[in-house]
Image (spheres, rainbow, N blue to C red):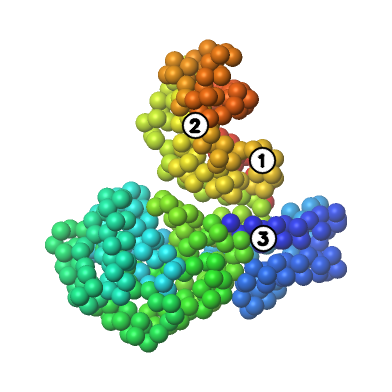
Amino acid sequence: MLENLSSRISGAIKTISGNARITENNIQDVLREVRIALLEADVAIPVVKTLIEQVKVEALGQKVLGSLKPDQAFIGVVNEKLTELMGSFNDALNLNCVPPAKILMAGLQGAGKTTTVGKLAKRLKETDKKKVLVVSADVYRPAAIEQLKVLAGSIDIECFPSDISQTPLAIAKAAEEYARLHYFDVLIIDTAGRLTIDTAMMDEIKELHQFLNPIETLFVADSMLGQDAVNTAKAFNEALELTGIILTKMDGDSRGGAALSIRQITGKPIKFIGVSEKVTGLEPFYPDRLASRILGMGDILSLIDEVKGAANEAQARKLMDKVKKGKKFDLEDFKSQFEQMNNMGGMSSIMDKLPSHIAQKAPQMVNDNLIKKNVAIINSMTKTERRKPDLLKASRKKRIAQGSGTSVQEVNQLLKQYEQISGMMKKFGGGGMMKMMKNFKHLMPKM
């Protein structure tokens, strides 16, 4: 995520690392490089101009004069200003109203609006413990109604029935009455998307907005569109008075122009970001965490949140008790750690949130394909072999390699990794990935 912007800014800041302090002369080159990096990332020109001016004034101010490490001081200033630019804090959903709290979803076709409805419903159900009803008012694309129905069924969320013979307003009225009579906490209304903004689209969604009077009106924008996403959000906000924005496809956005511009241009907060295609791939947006990632410092707090969400609490407690009692961490436990990584979006998602100086040192061979291969190797073992890895001698390794479609060398590599992780488990006293992630916090650079 935002790797191009991150590498450019990090490279620019290194140019002042050898100086005794920040001065008017040595800051010019680094500011020029940061400006170019932001413009190449498709950040709006007025936003770039304001940010660069603020960073220059702050960096040359009394706060960092005489710093022994000017690059660290400069990183601190840029981090602070990027965070302010994106909103400083997480702006959570406002559900403080008489139920059902109505959330109206708006956006162009192809931004991932319907999928985001499902992700948001799942999050509200599991994290906020809300009873959620979803409904599609997109009568122009029959597949949209079916898509939401199937998606809702897969996450055990009720979907109010609608069809293309109805008007969007009639669907909204019926869904609201049903939600009220059946004591739903939240009603999420998915509206029609268009390829472009048009008068008919705006009139229709204005009518829905006026009737529903939703407590939240969220614009779903494709982050990869950069300034086009920002301009579209601005147009919707002028018509509807948005309460927030959800940026989708952030995992595929290497530039970051929308994330850095949209708050300043629209005046509306980014409330969530889409980080994968999975139904779990929706995260609350924390400006300080994204600023940290842009500057190569990682996002350990979000990683810990993911671990908490992916972890099976009963399994984690069982593992901790097991290690505390002096029992050995076995290959069944090792397999569960791999499965947990997959639940978190795989190694690429995990590495993306680690500080760059840690991620760069990680073995290149640790990837999602290797995880799948390792799970296959462990699945080819008997229960006894998983619990007593010491039994794995040459003949057994050969059988396991044949059963998993791998080589004996790959089986040996897995066992070597297992021994390393087993040693870490002893050191941390159980707790698996949760404790490992907490330990990473101490490795983060101090600001």
Q: Provide residue 356's location: percent of width, then percent of height.
A: 67, 48
**Sequence-first disc among 1 and 2:** 1
Q: Is residue 9 left or right of residue 194?
A: right
Identified by mark 2, the residue type is Val
Q: Is residue 171 visible?
A: yes
Q: Residue at x 42, y 43 (%)?
A: 309
Q: Residue at x 27, y 59 (%)?
A: 149
Give the residue pinned by disc 3.
Answer: 4
The label number, if any, that marks residue 364 in the structure image: 1
Q: Secondary structure at mark 3?
A: helix
Q: Provide residue 52's location: percent of width, then percent of height.
A: 70, 71
Q: Residue at x 55, y 41 (%)?
A: 368
Q: Secondary structure at mark 2?
A: helix
**Sequence-first disc among 1 and 3:** 3
Q: Provide residue 380's location: percent of width, then percent of height.
A: 47, 24
- Between label 3 and label 2, give the one nearer the viewer: 2
Give the residue pinned by disc 2.
Answer: 375
